[in-house]
């Protein structure tokens, strides 16, 4: 309801006028006649424990163009021409078989009729290489709405059904443990009738479930892979009611676009992918006969400012090239470069844009006849250069959250990350070792840029190291690795030295040569990410190898460190207990992950808090009772209001469990709107702008009103989730409340203690619908508004609308 409606309702209930209000209140509220209010008591004198500010930490992973094409201000995508049809996979047909031969994540295509209802899909599938199995899609509504049977998922440990809803993907049903062997054919059968889904693998039933949460009842079918090469044959779709064959044979394969992702070739000349590159594998070779020809990239937001760029080229093109910034057909600025030399040479340039557009493009045109090879095409606006290289609006979005600590670079991204590939001059950096999350990062944002980010937003760094225990990150196989498993520990120690060593050390001297003479002083180090696929015994051995060596290195460098080890996923206490039993004396934190079904925005909080309590109790009885809990990845898988309610409730749980819970970090941090999955990010953007998701709105509200002293709250919250905290000076009490119920709740809080309240204020988020969400067109549909609160002596009264989150400050 609006503020006016809220006020009118309160006036109607109480019969008061503005003149009848206490001078110590603003926009008060009371319960409906006959309704029993939520009655709570807060002891304001004696905080039960201190809350660590790092509970409000964040996690920045290179995922869905969050860094390359996002926060980093480089405007050109695929600047090194390494990506060619990467996001689609490499689909072909051979001997009546469908073949996918690109080692990338989430390669799939669909076929058939969206009107197909109850049917049975049968096929045979074979994995040729890779770290996981294969996927079969069914009841596909569109690109963002489908089921798939994931066989050999989760590092080839499990078979399960996943459901994608509005871009958010989650598992449904129980699934079954199991893997997919390389080089053998499997018989796959999927039967779907109404909300009933059944699946068989080699004649054995592995799935039998009913989807009672808005099930898809019709749709196409499809084939997919995740980090594997695979083959499919004997594909058949049969209708259940009359056994009619709906499809049989080879499907039409997806068309292959231009050779280079994000680029378009124009004119009568040729554009070829060639294995002659400046610093990676490929470059683009352009040839022309004098007629206009070249390449172009779209989706640029251009403003009237100076743009700085460079391009490396070689070849025989006497007249050189022309580079233009365009607003469709209107030239906003241009420059001429060249001619190229016989060997690779850098050609820097500047272009002043004479106008603004949200539909801009960068065009490179050959001048005259000849041939040229291009690599490392770069463009950055003066506004980004002024921030150290970051896109200004996204940097402001990060600053708005004021993250006290930022985990980086992953996530799965960290598990095959090679830090030396991402330091030094940009044109010397090697591309990231795997195609993952719809991108193969060009490593433009490396250690030094990350440290600059932390400095600019006031965050402490937290680095996640690649221990070499995994051959893939979230199923994306590494295309290149260190020579031996034994090389990963020395490599990690060198990273510590690069970050924390002075210039007398080899790596400290290298950092200084890159323009950063002062050590970064990184304290927090995490030993890899989601190592469950390697098994608990292998990971225990890794922790016992790495942790003592890292502590010894830290002592040598004179910078104390805190070591974090990977705990279990969601409710996996078996993994947590095994890790703690074996490694407690050598680690400081256990890092756990949990992603929630957004439908469980209320019940999911209570269930996960019980896990935190159980884990804290186990730590207390361990060989290292000082160990702390870090929820390094958490979120509800949505960007509607449910994820805001979940965020508020879970943050309250973190504060309640603050004796042991001291560090947090939700995911995703940033996500480009072109992404095909994981629609849960705090900061959502494209080239034109950004908007905050509800989790951003609520977490910012909570953190902006942070107070470190946790106060005991007594009483029946009637389904609400309420915490109270106190500032260090004892002069302000903060009440944070989430009402996940479909009914309004009137709340009365009695303050028991020496605090003498003078004023009270309230901020509330209550968009009125669980499906409310922000968009680029309506970025403030879910927003903070002023609420109504009444202060009478030691009692505070306020109303929580249905499905709302609110903060009340008593000063």
Image: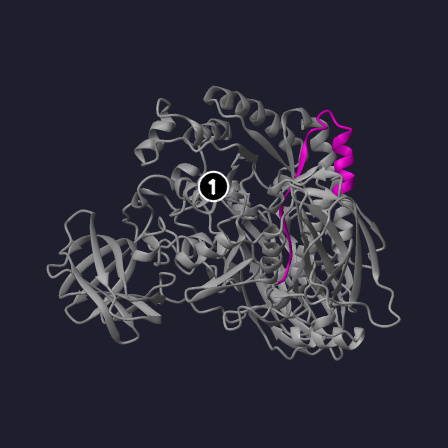
Instruction: State the image coordinates of residue 293 (x, y, percent, origin top left).
Output: 22, 69
Residue 732 appearing in the image: yes
Q: Residue at x 35, y 50 (%)?
A: 389
Assess whether residue 630 is covered by the magenta stretch: yes
Q: Which image quadrant is residue 261 in?
A: bottom left
Instruction: Specify the quadrant that holds the N terminus.
Output: bottom right
Q: Nearer the viewer, residue 86 or 525?
A: 525
| 138 relative position to 64: left or right | right
The magenta segment is 612-638
Q: Nearer the viewer, residue 365 or 638?
A: 638
Residue 65 appearing in the image: no
In this rendering, is residue 393 above or below 457? Answer: below
Q: Residue at x 66, y 76 (%)?
A: 4
Q: Which residue is mark 1?
A: 417
Instruction: State the image coordinates of residue 528 (x, y, percent, origin top left).
Output: 56, 37
In this rendering, is residue 396 above or below 521? Answer: below
Assess whether residue 274 is covered by the magenta stretch: no
| 500 relative position to 682: left or right | left
Q: Residue at x 64, y 80 (%)?
A: 115
Q: Residues within 10 Å of mark 1 (few under 14, many from 20)?
A: many
Instruction: State the image coordinates of residue 424 (x, y, percent, origin top left).
Output: 33, 39
| 24 relative position to 672: left or right | right
| 515 relative position to 165: left or right | left
In this rendering, is residue 130 above or below 114? Answer: above
Q: Nearer the viewer, residue 670 or 750?
A: 750
């Amino acid at each position: 309801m609006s503020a006016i409606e809220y006020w009118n309702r309160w006036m109607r209930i109480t019969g008061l006028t503005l003149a009848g209000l206490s001078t110590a209140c603003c926009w008060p509220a009371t319960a409906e006649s006959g309704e029993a209010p939520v009655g709570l008591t807060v002891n304001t004198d004696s905080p039960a424990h201190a809350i660590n500010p790092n509970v409000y930490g964040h996690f920045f992973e290179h995922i869905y163009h969050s860094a390359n094409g996002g926060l980093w201000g480089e405007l050109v995508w695929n600047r090194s021409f390494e990506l060619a049809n990467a996001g689609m996979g490499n689909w072909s047909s051979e001997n009546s078989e469908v073949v996918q031969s690109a080692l990338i994540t989430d390669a799939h295509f669909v076929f058939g009729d969206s009107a197909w209802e109850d049917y049975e899909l049968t096929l045979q599938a074979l994995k040729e290489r890779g770290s996981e199995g294969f996927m079969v899609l069914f009841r596909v509504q569109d690109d963002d709405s489908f089921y798939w049977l994931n066989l050999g998922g989760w590092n080839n440990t499990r078979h399960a059904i996943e459901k994608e809803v509005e871009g958010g993907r989650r598992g449904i049903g129980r699934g079954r443990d199991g893997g997919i062997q390389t080089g053998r054919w499997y018989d796959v059968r999927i039967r779907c009738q109404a909300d009933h889904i059944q699946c068989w693998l080699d004649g054995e039933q592995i799935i039998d479930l009913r989807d009672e949460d808005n099930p898809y009842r019709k749709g196409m079918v499809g084939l997919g892979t995740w980090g594997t090469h695979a083959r499919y044959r004997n594909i058949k779709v049969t209708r259940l009611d009359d056994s009619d064959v709906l499809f049989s044979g080879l499907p039409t394969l997806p068309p292959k676009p231009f050779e280079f992702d994000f680029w378009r070739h124009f004119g009568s000349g040729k554009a070829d992918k060639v294995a002659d590159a400046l610093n990676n594998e490929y470059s683009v070779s352009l040839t022309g006969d004098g007629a206009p020809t070249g390449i172009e990239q779209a989706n640029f937001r251009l403003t009237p400012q100076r743009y700085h760029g460079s391009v490396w080229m070689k070849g025989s093109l006497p007249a050189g090239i022309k580079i233009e910034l365009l607003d469709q057909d209107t030239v906003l600025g241009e420059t001429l470069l060249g001619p190229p030399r016989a060997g690779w040479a850098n050609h820097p340039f500047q272009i002043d844009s004479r106008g603004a557009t949200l539909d801009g493009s960068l065009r490179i045109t050959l001048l005259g006849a000849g041939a040229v090879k291009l690599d490392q095409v770069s463009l950055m606006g003066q506004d980004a250069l002024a921030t150290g290289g970051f896109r200004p609006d996204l940097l402001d979005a990060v600053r708005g959250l004021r993250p006290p600590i930022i985990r980086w670079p992953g996530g799965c991204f960290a598990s095959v990350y090679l830090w030396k590939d991402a330091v030094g001059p940009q044109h010397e950096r090697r591309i990231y070792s795997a195609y993952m999350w719809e991108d193969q990062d060009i490593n433009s944002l490396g250690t030094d840029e990350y440290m600059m980010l932390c400095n600019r937003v006031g965050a402490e760094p937290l680095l996640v190291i690649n221990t070499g225990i995994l051959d893939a990150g979230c199923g994306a196989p590494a295309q290149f690795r260190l020579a031996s498993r034994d090389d990963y520990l020395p490599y990690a120690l060198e990273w510590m030295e690069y970050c924390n060593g002075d210039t007398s050390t080899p790596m400290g001297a290298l950092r200084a040569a890159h323009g950063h003479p002062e050590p970064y002083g990184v304290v927090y180090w995490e030993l890899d990410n989601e190592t469950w696929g390697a098994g608990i015994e292998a990971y225990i051995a890794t922790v016992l190898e790495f942790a003592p060596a890292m502590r010894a290195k830290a002592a040598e460098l004179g910078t104390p460190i805190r070591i974090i080890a990977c705990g279990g996923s969601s409710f996996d206490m078996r993994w947590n207990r095994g890790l703690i039993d074996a490694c407690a004396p050598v680690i400081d934190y256990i890092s756990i992950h949990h992603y929630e079904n957004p439908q469980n925005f209320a019940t999911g909080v209570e269930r996960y808090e019980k896990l935190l309590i159980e884990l804290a109790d186990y730590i207390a009885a361990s060989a290292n009772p000082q160990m702390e809990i870090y929820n390094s990845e958490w979120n509800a898988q949505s960007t509607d209001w449910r994820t805001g309610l979940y965020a508020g409730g879970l943050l309250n749980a973190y504060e309640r469990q603050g004796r042991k819970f001291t560090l947090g970090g939700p995911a995703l941090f940033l996500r480009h709107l072109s992404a095909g999955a994981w629609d849960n990010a705090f900061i959502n953007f494209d080239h034109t702008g950004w908007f905050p998701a509800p989790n951003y709105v609520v977490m910012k509200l909570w953190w902006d009103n942070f107070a470190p002293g946790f106060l005991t709250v007594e009483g029946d919250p009637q389904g609400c989730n309420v915490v109270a905290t106190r500032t260090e000076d004892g002069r302000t009490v903060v009440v944070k409340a989430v009402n996940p119920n479909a009914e309004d709740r009137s709340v009365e809080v009695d303050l028991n203690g020496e605090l003498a309240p003078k004023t009270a204020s309230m901020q509330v988020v209550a968009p009125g619908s669980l499906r409310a969400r922000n968009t680029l067109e309506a970025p403030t549909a879910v927003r903070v508004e002023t609420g109504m609160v009444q202060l009478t002596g030691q009692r505070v009264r306020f109303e929580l609308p249905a499905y709302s989150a609110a903060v009340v400050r008593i000063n």
